[in-house]
Image: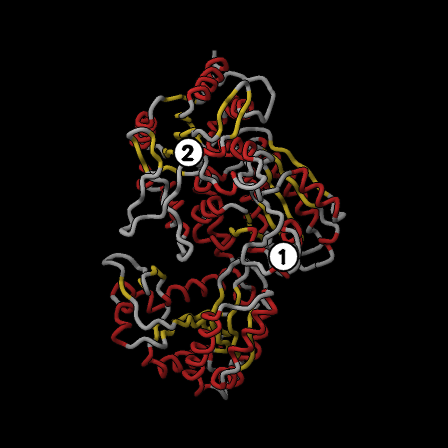
Amino acid sequence: MELWHGNLGSFVGDAVSGSMGLRLWEAFQRYNGHPPSQSEASSWQHSLSAVANAASALKEKDIGVVCEYHLQFSKRRIDVVFLGRGEGSHDRAAIVELKQWAKAELIDSESNNLRVADTEVLHPSEQALNYRHTLEDTHSAFVELGMLGASSAYCHDMSPKHAAPLRDQRFSQLLYRSPLFDKSDAPKLCEYLDVNIGQGGGAKCLEAFRGGRFRPSPRLLDVLEETIKSDRRWTLIDTQQVAYNAIWAEVCAALKHGVRDSQVTTKAPIIIVRGAPGTGKTVIAVRLLRDAIKHGLSAVHSTGGKAFTIAMRSAFDEAKELFIWNMSLRRATYKGIDLLLVDEAHRLRKTSDTRFTPAAERGRKSQFEELIDAARLTVFFVDDNQYIRPDEIGSSTMLRSEATRLQIPTKDYRLEEQFRCGGCVEYVNWVESTLGFEESPRQSWGDSYKVAIVNTAEGLEARVRDAAASGMNARMVAGFCWRWSKPNSDGSLVSDVEIGSWSRPWNRKALDSKQYPPAEHPYTLWARTEAGLGQVGSIYSAQGFEFDVVGVIWGEDLVWRNGQWVAQRSKSYDRPVIGGNADSLRLFRNAYRVLLTRGIRETVILCLDPETKEYLAEAINSTNA
């Protein structure tokens, strides 16, 4: 979807006359149900006028233009795309990222990011190049019709002197692939556009571009294949293969009439796959994603949790466009995807509304309906005891109820066999029983899994560091019982988690104003790099990751009193969980269930409440007596 499209002559006329800003404002209002910010509206007028003036010498040529093109399954919008034929008569789309910056600075001698007005930002040429790669990997005009991409950045208010940092030697390869033009370079930008898209065919290219749909490229399939082959985590084992075979047969049956038969989905069932942590839900989802794309279908993996999506994007870095958030499907094309794999479906929300959603837009459609409307077939992977926020309503019961309401059949599968925690089903059952989720008798896990209770934070950290020193991946996690501060002005972290004389920081917070490559996101750096050893992960950063050894700090938010679990809201800093009418007891129990099942080989527990510690020790000892 774009806010404006037309030929270059019309674009130049509207932009230079001043009417373009109003046209974009009206289109934004129609699409979003609320007006754009004043700063965004003014930037449209100024930036589009600048690039229109630069391209005006080409206005008589057959060149198509798209403004504010919304990348599917993303909040990102491309400023301008010029379309036409380039050298060799290839259909081509030339992306231009527009910046009103007057100056930018290098952060240090190593970083490839820049600093603009005290904000760390991506180089605009890299931003444009990333947009180009996204289109090349996921847009049918590129994948199926062979359209080629070009990208550049235009800093139309920046002098050559102030543009010097953006042309530092470290960016030489980037600028070769995605050139930068400053205030003095309007003629060069015009020449660049002429070479890339100035040979006619713009109307045809515009039609193909605007009619495009989501279509994963062969390159993304290659990345999936290579990652699955090289990482044992994505290998199907025993009953996982049995479940996968049954689900894949159901997928094929539901889509058997062909990729483009829009009538099939009216009767396609919703597939619900239930399982506890470590039973293989995500492994099956990834294999379904791979095989769907291999068979020519369009498919994506979607979740409602930031840490989990980041973990997936990090694992499949070069195929990250296949891993999205549920919220990204709010305005997806109706039945535009063949197969949607909704992992962690317990994290579904009632709606995708946020505090920024206008009143007139609120409650327009449930998130469940948005998800099933986005795809011809939807598979939900759910754990009924793993939602961790009061606005998360996903459960197998809810999914079946909503399907019944909409008169859609369901197919149910349950995964029983445990593959996390060393495959030790006895330990996982102990966690379930101890936290009151299951009443099944506890069985000894013997030497198949290690569990220990320590008396001090120093002892817990020592166990974690010893495991890391021996080559294992080990981390500390904790209940949300301490405030989580922003980094200090110098970038250092505040040691919020204090236990006696011992203190350590939570893992670094992600900045809303900054876009992170998956491998460089603070959650990934905490979970996968040495820096994370001295940091403590919260439930929101730990969910989605697993470790050989996990050290769990059990705070005073969930305690054992008089034979039952009690929630102590005053001991928690998790505002959504302790506010309003939230079922804090259930949410605290769910959170510790997640933390206690992050380990593959060993779980080490430090419990800060004496009575609860005594109960846990007795529960462990009596089980393994």
Residue to which mark 2 is pinned: 478
Kindly identify the amino acid type of the residue bearing the numbered disc 1: Arg
Is residue 143 positioned above or below 470 on the image? below
* Nearest-to-viewer mark from 2 and 1: 1
Residue 402 lies left or right of residue 605; in this view the side is: right
- Is residue 232 something that shows in the picture? no
Residue to which mark 1 is pinned: 362
Q: Position of residue 381 (x, y in %)?
A: 60, 41
Q: Position of residue 207 (x, y in %)?
A: 59, 74
Depth check, front residue: 491 or 451: 491
Depth check, front residue: 222 or 125: 125
Is residue 115 positioned above or below 234 on the image? below
- Tell me the crowding category of disc 2: few under 14, some 14 to 19, or many 20 or more residues within 10 angstroms, Cα based: many
Residue drawn at point x = 25 percent, y = 66 percent? 168
Residue 529 lies left or right of residue 445; in this view the side is: left
Q: Are marks 2 and 1 in contact (CB under 8 Å)?
A: no
Disc 2, SS: strand
- Label ID, residue 519: none
Kindly identify the amino acid type of the residue bearing the numbered disc 2: Ala
- Tell me the crowding category of disc 1: few under 14, some 14 to 19, or many 20 or more residues within 10 angstroms, Cα based: some
Residue 408 lies left or right of residue 118; in this view the side is: right
Is residue 166 positioned above or below 391 on the image? below
Q: Position of residue 234 (x, y in %)?
A: 49, 40
Residue drawn at point x = 49 percent, y = 29 percent? 558
Residue drawn at point x = 54 percent, y = 47 percent? 304
